[in-house]
Amino acid sequence: MNELSVLYRLKLKTRDIRIFFLILSILLLPASAILAHGPKGHGGMEFTALQAAKKGITLYDRLVASGKLTNAWETDLEDIEVFSRQGDNNREFVVKFSRRKGEPKSVYIFFTEKGDYRGSNFTGK
C-alpha cells in the first residue's frame, strides 16, 4: 500500500466515526429529556388537580357505563369540582360530581397525593 491510500482510508474512517457520533448524539438527545428527573428530583412528578380531574372523570364514566351509577348521573350532571384536603395521614384529592336533581346530589372520588385511587362515596367523608 502506498502512503496516499493509507491516508485516504484514515480520512474515511475519521469521517465515518464523526458521522456515527453525530447520528448517535442526535438519536440520544431526546432520551436525555425523557430521562431527566424534573424539579422534584428522583421522587417523580407531583400528582396535580388536573390529573385528579382526568382520573376522576375516567372512573366516573366507568361507574356510569357499568351501571353502578344510573344514567341520570350522566344526563343530569351539573358540576365537577376538584379540591385537595388533609386526609387521615396525608393530603388527598377529592373529585366531586354534582347533579341537578335526584338523591344523592353528589358522588365523591378520592385519590392519594400520589394519584392512587382511594375510594368513592356519596357523603364526601
Image (cartoon, rainbow, N blue to C red):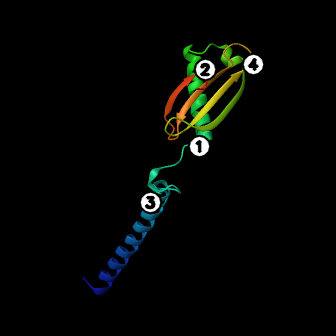
At x 75% / y 19%, what residue is drawn?
A: 100
Mark closer to the observer (3, 4) = 4
Expressed as whole percent of the image width and height from the top left, the position of residue 23 reads: 44, 63
Label whose residue precedes the other's in the sequence (1 or 4):
1
Label whose residue precedes the other's in the sequence (3 or 4):
3
What residue did someone put label 1 on? 48
What residue did someone put label 3 on? 28
Q: Neighbour class for label 4 at 10 Å: few (<14), some, many (≥20)?
A: some
At x 69% / y 18%, what residue is drawn?
A: 105
Real-space CA distance between mark 1 and mark 4, rounded to the nearest whole angstrom:
27 Å
Evaluate if marks 1 and 4 touch, with contact meaning CB atoms under 8 Å apart. no
Real-space CA distance between mark 2 and mark 4, rounded to the nearest whole angstrom:
15 Å
Residue 4: image quadrant is bottom left
Q: Residue 100: give its label.
A: 4
Label whose residue precedes the other's in the sequence (2 or 3):
3
At x 64% / y 28%, what residue is drawn?
A: 96
Q: Is residue 115 above or below residue 97?
A: below
Real-space CA distance between mark 1 and mark 3, rounded to the nearest whole angstrom:
30 Å
Label whose residue precedes the other's in the sequence (1 or 3):
3
What residue did someone put label 2 on? 122
Instruction: Determine the secondary structure under disc 2.
Output: loop
Q: Is residue 69 above or below residue 21?
A: above
Residue 81 shown left or right of residue 4 in the figure: right
Q: In front: 68, or 108?
A: 108
Q: Neighbour class for label 3 at 10 Å: few (<14), some, many (≥20)?
A: few
Residue 125: image quadrant is top right
